[in-house]
Image (cartoon, rainbow, N blue to C red):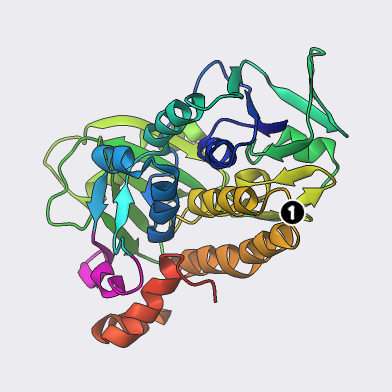
């Protein structure tokens, strides 16, 4: 039996992909149900192809928004808008889909439970894996031939195996606010450059989400209190913004020392975390899950290949995105030149859309 630890998008993708190949899978989830938080909300073209093969794409598309472009802006206006239609010969999905991951996980769960020999156990906070034994802190145990750890950045499985998780923590915290204001005149995905206060504006089916950098040494309460003033700097409605939810979190850039220890595989945030700029985290985690399931049980070099992608592509691109947001003067001319040249723009979009990893 294969045990998957974690019922997020990565864990459930791995479980469903394995189930479709006829493997018996048990998913152990610490929570009492699926997580409802928005978290990741961008699905890139190769991820859409993978979800089609799993049979879940039509349901995701029905819940999401198609984003055929994304825009780079500064506080004065539009710098460049990139048209993913340039990828029409490279992918059947020359666009992004904007949809919170919390809308995907129930779809994956429904499809998984339609398979015999597959189950999901909620309220199972896995604390350790020792050989073939998967255990909780209160003494419950499951025997597994293989374990896929998709239990997030604070992975108890990774910690129990003693796998290092080296990297950096970004100096500023990230503040994300959800609002039901209408921000017309924008693409569905917008990166706003500014050396002092950059921003990301993302449309999801339910809200606009605004991501702002926040100083590392100030109280959360103070930053949340001045959120309204900062939002007014983005667009002044002549009244306070309507904010449905806001939170502050620290952002890390880390990669596990290995993605495989014996019969245990690390996937998604349990294996690698990065800043959210570019929407690479959830997507690369889903790619981990599919790569493992397709190769299983003869994994060969797949775990090492996935680690190389995390190190040489995801980490590099997401960190470059962060540097660009904070230092627009060094990048604006190059972005305008690239966007004006269809050949260069296509090459750029192949990488930002995760169709190429060079």
Q: What stretch is highlighted in magenta?
A: 68-91
Identity of the residue drawn at 73% across and 30% down: 1
Camera sees residue 215: no
350 on left or right of 161: left
Identify the residue under disc 1: 298
Question: Picture quarter containing residue 187?
Answer: bottom left
Residue 89 belongs to magenta span: yes
Seen from this angle, which residue lies furthest right?
131
Give residue 119's position: percent from left, percent from top.
59, 22
Identity of the residue drawn at 48% across and 38% down: 248
Q: Which of the pair 186/341 is nearer the observer?
A: 341
Give residue 190's position: percent from left, percent from top.
29, 59
Check disc 1 and report its element: helix, strand or loop: loop
Residue 319 belongs to magenta span: no
Identity of the residue drawn at 66% across and 32% down: 5
Question: Picture quarter containing residue 157?
Answer: top right
In this view, 216 is above or below 78? above
């Amino acid at each position: 039996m294969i045990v998957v630890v974690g019922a997020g998008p990565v864990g459930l993708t791995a479980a469903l992909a394995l189930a479709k190949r006829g493997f018996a899978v048990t998913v152990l989830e610490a929570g009492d149900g699926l997580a409802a938080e928005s978290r990741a909300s961008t699905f890139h073209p190769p991820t859409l192809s993978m979800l089609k093969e799993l049979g879940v794409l039509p349901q995701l598309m029905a819940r999401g928004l198609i984003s055929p472009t994304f825009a780079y802006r500064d506080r004065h206006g539009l710098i460049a808008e990139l048209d993913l239609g340039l990828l029409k010969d490279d992918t059947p999905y020359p666009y992004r889909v904007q949809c919170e991951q919390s809308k995907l996980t129930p779809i994956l769960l429904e499809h998984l439970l339609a398979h015999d020999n597959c189950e999901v156990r909620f309220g199972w906070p896995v604390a350790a894996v020792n050989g073939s034994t998967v255990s909780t802190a209160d003494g419950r145990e499951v025997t597994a031939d293989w374990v896929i750890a998709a239990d997030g950045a604070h992975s108890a499985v990774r910690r129990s195996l003693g796998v290092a998780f080296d990297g950096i923590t970004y100096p500023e915290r990230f503040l994300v606010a959800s609002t039901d204001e209408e921000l017309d005149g924008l693409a569905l995905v917008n990166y706003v450059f500014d050396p002092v206060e950059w921003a990301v504006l993302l449309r999801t089916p339910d809200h606009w989400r605004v991501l702002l950098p926040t100083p590392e040494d100030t109280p959360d309460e103070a930053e949340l209190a001045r959120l309204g003033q900062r939002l007014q700097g983005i667009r002044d409605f002549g009244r306070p913004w309507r904010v449905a939810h806001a939170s502050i979190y620290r952002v890390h850039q880390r990669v596990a020392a290995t993605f495989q220890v014996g019969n245990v595989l690390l996937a998604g945030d349990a294996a690698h975390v990065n800043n959210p700029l570019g929407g690479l985290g959830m997507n690369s985690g889903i790619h981990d899950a599919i790569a493992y399931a397709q190769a299983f049980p003869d994994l060969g070099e797949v775990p090492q290949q996935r680690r190389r992608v995390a190190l040489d592509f995801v980490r590099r691109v997401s960190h470059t995105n962060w540097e660009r947001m904070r230092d627009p003067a060094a990048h604006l001319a190059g972005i305008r030149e690239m966007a004006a040249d269809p050949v260069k723009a296509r090459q750029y979009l192949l990488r930002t859309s995760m169709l190429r990893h060079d």
